[in-house]
Amino acid sequence: MINRMGMQKAGFVLLGATTLVVVIPILLVIGYIIYEGMEALSWQFIRAAPFDGMKQGGIFPAIVGTLLLTLGTALVAIPIGVGGTVYLAEYARDTWLTRCIRLAIINLAGIPSIVYGLFGLGMFVLFLKMGTSIMAGALTLAIMTLPVIISTAEEALRAVPTEFRTVSASLGGTRWQGIRYIILPQALPGIITGIILGLLRAAGETAPILFTVAAFFLPHLPQSPFDQTMALPYHLYVISTQVPGMPDSIKYGTALVLLALVLSMNIAASIIRSYFRRRRQW
Amino acid sequence: MSEPMEKIRVENLNFYYGDKPALEGISVPIQERQITALIGPSGCGKSTFLRCLNRMNDTIRGTRVEGHVLLDGVDIYARGTNVVDLRKRVGMVFQRPNPFPQTILDNVSFGPRMLGLAKNRKDVADIVEESLRGAALWDEVKDILKKDALSLSLGQQQRLCIARAIAVKPEVILMDEPCSALDPIATLQIEELMQSLRKDYTIVIVTHNMQQAARASNYTGFFWMGKLVEFAPTEAIFTRPSQRLTEEYVTGRAG
């Protein structure tokens, strides 16, 4: 007969196994990329521009391009995302209009990234005549990132107890003062999480930059926001599918750099977050 | 000793949640630098009444107020009243101790920082010490100002909330059952604190605890089903109430 302790053990093993199933593929992917990519990694690979049909040299322009695109995305998406979220969560009343806006935001988060790419092509590249440029690419990525930032940040603001708003009002604070001095500081770790999640997605996406900014081969660095640039995800796509005879080590090396970039951003974010979280508990 | 001045005068106040009246025809004088206790059974409207005095009910949608509340002779429900300034003058302490999850220092300095009352670090330090002394908490926390406020006992947390409230230098302090989450010793400490606060502030306290009203207040108002049944000096309410309902309630036969 299976007694309660037996069931408890079985449950423990079963649930532990599902966790393993989640973790193992991640470790395999990371391990495999490191194993295959380490060979290509060198100072030259990171610092040099590609040449000889991209089979030689490094991926420096693509690294810079991805960093610039992420920075541009951050510059646009953070102020608009956080501002919009504060309005939605703290000021806007619950009407059918705000409900529609929320629904739209949730749906926007689910739109395939290639659709954002086509929108960016139509809107920024062609209609606003920005051409294929960092500007157009960053704006496209920002629009794709906004729903992620807004929904996560709104969650964070709503998690701050209503009581804190009441207390700051009872002390003679305006609604904005309450937001500025207690609500935002309390919600900051959650908001930062949302920002990082969104930016990480932007940094790793290929489809939105396909038509809006990415250059197939551009060995020099961009000089202005209206220049094209190479970018890591697109470069990886190109060398994996468009260039015959590309050595595997370069592909995996590029993947490894992209992975390292994204992971280090993630870690940096966790450190910032835990710094702000240290002072908070409810 | 001269007759105390009237700090707040409530005239014929009606309050509605939607169409449902919660307060009907309340008129009452609140004396300056005195403690006024409001007693009555749950749901009688005493907390609602308290929140009319600093317009905290404004934040609840679908509520409506009629009548007048005069603070120093000026109607706080008059058109053009600056509600934010009003709440700085009429502070509030809540039922459950609710310090922010920050340091003791940050809690007390919160209001002055938010309202820009302190110009520099020294101002902040002065206000914090003065407020904590005022709330009879200074000696217990002066060496741990950088510690998390939530590490204090509940009674200390409530005194911290009082310090946070007086840090913006209000004229009136509204207390909404401030001791209901506290043990008897912490409750007594708050009551003693109220006596010392009375020198500087007008206090209105809602309480479930009739002994507390009897011990700690100068005036008592008895609410019953949205109406103010009786308002008199506390001693009179508890020894020779003029209304039969009041007598039944304070002796425990009604309510």
Image (spheres, grey):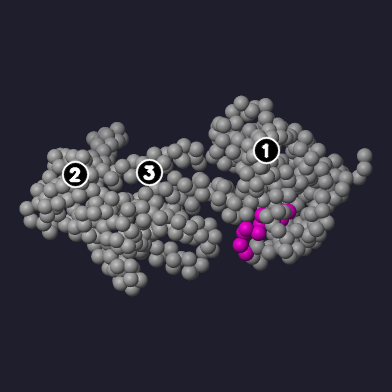
Q: Chain under label 3?
A: A
Query: Residue sitting at 9 percent across and 48 percent down?
Result: A247
Distance Cα–Cα, label 3 vs label 1: 35 Å
Are dots 2 and 1 on a single chain?
A: no
The answer to whether A222 appears left or right of B247 in the picture is left
| Numbered label attached to residue A45 | 2
Q: For numbered disc 1, what is the local secondary structure?
A: helix
Amino acid carrying label 3: it is: Ala
Can you identify the residue that label 3 sits on?
A269
- Letter of the chain that mark 2 sits on in the rendering: A
Compare residues A43 and A268 and report the one nearer the observer: A43
Nearer to the camera, A135 or A261: A135
Q: Nearer the viewer, mark 2 or mark 1?
A: 2
Disc ID at residue B185: none
Task: Please report the residue visible at 66 percent of the width from the left and 35 percent of the height from the top.
Answer: B122
Q: Position of residue A206 (x, y in %)?
A: 24, 58
Residue B6 location in percent, x, y? 85, 50
Count of marks, rendered view: 3
Label 3 vs 2, first from the N-terminus: 2
Measured as percent of width and height from the top left, residue A127 is found at 33, 73
Residue at which label 1 appears: B123
For the point 51% across and 49% down, which residue is it?
A: A184
Foreground label between 3 and 1: 1
The residue segment tinted magenta is B52-62
**Label 2 to label 1: alpha-carbon separation:** 57 Å
Q: Amino acid at mark 1?
A: Asp
Q: Residues within 10 Å of mark 1 (few under 14, many from 20)?
A: some
Give residue A134's quadrant in the image: bottom left
* Placement of B24 over or under B135, stated as above or below: below
> Label 2: how many residues lie within 10 Å, few (<14), some (14-19) or many (20+)?
some
Same chain, marks 3 and 1? no
Identify the amino acid type marked 2. Phe
